[in-house]
Structures are given as C-alpha cells and as structure tokens.
Image: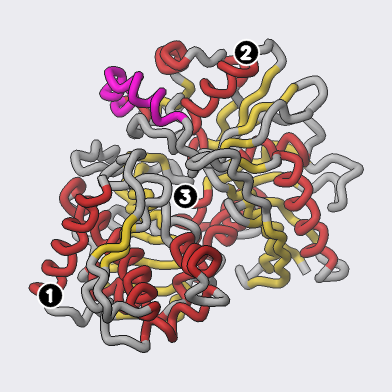
Amino acid sequence: MKAILALDQGTTSSRAILFDERGSIAAVAKKELRQIYPRPGWVEHDPGEIASTQLAVAAEAVAQVPGVELVAIGITNQRETTLLWDRDSGKPVANAIVWQDRRTAALCDELRGHEPLFRKKTGLLLDPYFSGTKIRWLLDRLGAGPRLAFGTVDSWLIWQLTAGRVHVTDATNASRTLLFDIHRREWDDELLGILGIPREMLPAVVSSSEVVGETASGLPIPAGIPIAGIAGDQQAALFGQRCTRPGMAKNTYGTGCFIVMNTGENAVESKHGLLTTVTAEGHYALEGSIFIAGAAVQWLRDSLGIIATAPEIEPLAASVEDSGGVVFVPAFTGLGAPHWDPHARGAIVGLTRGSSPAHIARAALDAIALQTAEVLEAMRADSGLEVTELRVDGAASTNDLLMQTQADLAGARVVRAAVPETTALGAAYLAGLAAGLWGENDIDAQWRSDRVFEPRLDPAARRNRLARWREAVSRVR
C-alpha cells in the first residue's frame, strides 16, 4: 500500500497519521505533550520532547501497516511556537516558548509605535502571540551567538528528520513570525533590525509543496523518505478542507479556534482586528485567532471538576434549555481576534442562585460559538464577501450541540468534514502533490462532508445574544 505519513505536531500532543491513496486514514498514533507553566501567563514545551514524541508516533503509525510504501512525509505544526538551538550540537538552548505565552506583552507595548509598519508588511498585529518578540526575549537572556538557529516547530522537526542537514520553513509558518514580508515573500531586514534579530539565524523559506530533503538514517522510521509538504496547522486545515476559492472559510476547533477565509490574490488589510496571512497554495487569507476554545472545556474538567471527561460536556449542557443568562468569557491568556487585549482575563458573569454546572457548561459551549461568530462578522465587514458556509473540523466539531449553536449564532450553514483530521490531511495532500501521488482534481474529488447544520435562530435573537456577549467581553478588558 502506498501512503503519505502526516506528522501533526500540536500544542497538546504529537500525532502521526498514515493516509492511503484515497485520502483515507490507514493508521493513527498519538502521544500527549507535557505543558510547562513557569509563571502565570507563561507556557513552554521541551524541544526534546517535541522531537521524541513526534518520532515515536511516526514509527508507531508506520508499524501499524506492515509493508507500507511511504511515498512522502507532510508536516503540519503549531505555528508561532519559538525554538532556538545550537547549529553545531543541534541541542536546544532553551525551552520552546509556546504561541499561547504572554510574557512579551510589555515588549509589544514598547514597540507600539512601529505597529503600522509591522501591520503593513506582515499582516499581523504586535502581540505576544507571534514569534518575533519571543525570539527577542530569548536573545536578551541568551545573547545572539553566531551559531544559533531559530525555527518554528516545522523547522525543528525537519532539522531532526534530516540530522541537521536542512534548515527551512515554509511561507505559512514564516508569515506568523512578525519578520516576513507577505507581499515580497521574504524575510524583512527593516523588521529584523527593529527587533534586533540576526538574519543568519533564520531558516530558508520554501514552498508548502516541494521536496526539501529526505529522512536520515538512524531514525525509528525508514531513511530516504522525501519530506515534501509543510504548512502551519491552520493553513494546512484550510487546504485539507479544500477552501481554495475566495470567500470559502473553515474553523478548526482545538485548544483554540482558528477561523480562516480565503481571499484569493487579494491581501485584505483588516480594519476589524483580523490578521492577513498566506495560504499553502500561495493565496492570501483573513484569519481570526481565538486563544481559548477546547481549553475552556479542559478547564471545566481539570480545574472545576464539573465534568470527568471532555465529551461529558455535551449531555450536561444539553440538559438545560440555555445558559440561564450565564456568559463565560474564557480570556485565560488574554483576548485574540478581534479584540487583541493581552491583559484581559477570564470571567463568568450573570450568575444567580439558580445557576448550575449545566448552565456553566452551556455557557462554555456558547463562548466558543460566540467568539467564532464575532470573527465571521469581522471577516464579512473586511472582505465584502458573504460567508454562507463554514467548514469545520477539530476535536470539538464532533459535538453536535456546539455545531448547531455555531450555525445559529453565525447565521451560516456549518458543514462538518467527513475526515475530522483535516489539518493532517492538508499536510498529506501537500506532500502527495509534490511527490506526484495526487493531482489537484484528485484531492478535490476526495473531500466530503459528514453532516450539515442549518441556522435555526431568529436573526433578532442572534443579535441579542451577540450584544450580551460583547457586554460581557467589555467587563474583562
């Protein structure tokens, strides 16, 4: 059997998925990734653990299909997470600073006068979310040694897979660093100068779909396998969902929520708190990044003990007709799009003596849908394109109550993909295209939906729900 090995290195786990020639899943392996919280608002990962867990699950997935012929490897990853390592030894010089980390909020405030320039060139805001200020923070404490290498997680994994022979990233990951001009498609010396980051630290920027190297010997997976696809997780999901035409949008429900809308060859400059970014096929997109989505459900499980497992939230929330006036704003690490307030903190408002765990659970699901609806409104306003359909994937997309709530509050049809692993599927498609396993028409024909949720909420009721949400958001800022 011919197959593509997709490596999906995410915030909370490393996964490997084998996709056969029909784009169907042939094997899956997963390992949890330890979260390190040195201080409130700080989030780190162990770079060695990122590499070891990803290689372990790759080997496990391949072992599940004896005799499989690996055509190529595709990589997708948590994007803005920042790693520095020594080129000579290949060893990391510090823990990875995760995209959720807010330690550079003060530095972003200091640089605020440069924000229009960063916005114009990179499509991004000055926020701790992105890699650039994380690199600066590390260099301030480590010094800018001549042999230091920077990479996002894709670069680090490719370095590991090729035994240090290849130091690259793709444009989708580069576009999330605050260092990459998305119009000229290259690293920008002016921005590097402002942040004091040496250009020689940076990886070469390659296409999302091309052979960049081969696996080295001595790994737990076969040597000589082409590494042929690279894309940041959200752009990989956009590609896997086949949102390749202007106005098509997807939302991935994971730790956070990431809504991305293809705007074609038009790099729309947002006036409503969205990001302009690059897609895997070279188009532009508007993106709304929501920091806390599934993580709010984890919090109800791990910190409040309202549920024992994440899937229990659906029957608990469905046991009440609505949230009973409770509004949950899960700004645990600040607010992302469209507000961009790193100093905001979470709150549950509207509590009464009649409020129950079920009402809080319902409010948590509402919060995920309300944040998404707010971003979609901003996308419509910025682009002038009407979003009538939202393609969805990710772990929480299996929650039918949440998906119906999403359709109601977004005022759009919600279409759930038949293959929920669309992030990994997108990476596999990119690798398969470069390796000649598929053509564009082949992968278009493979995409299919699992279920469609039509909006049922009265427009006036929808507006009222959004107004109550915005009032609650104003309380936490």
Pick whichever of labels 3 and 1 is earlier in the sequence: 3
Q: Is residue 236 above or below residue 214?
A: below
Q: Which residues are magenta?
A: 104-120
> Which residue is at 91% across, 43% downward?
218
What residue do we see at 19% from left, 60% from top? 386
Mark nearer the viewer, 3 or 1: 1
Look at the picture and state if 20 lies above or below 426. Answer: below
Instruction: Give the SS element for disc 2.
Output: loop
Query: Dot 1 corresponds to which residue?
Result: 461
x, y percentage for residue 282? Answer: 43, 41
Between disc 2 and disc 3, the foreground one is: 2
Instruction: Inspect the image, locate mark 2, and give the three-letter code of the amino acid beneath it.
Output: Ala
Front position in the image: 264 or 449: 449
Decide which of tag 2 and tag 3 comes sooner along the chain: 2
Q: Quadrant of residue 204?
A: top right
Instruction: Quickly name the residue at label 3.
Output: 235
Instruction: For residue 253, say whether it is visible.
Output: no
In the image, which disc is placed on residue 144? 2
Q: Residue at x 82, y 65 (%)?
A: 68
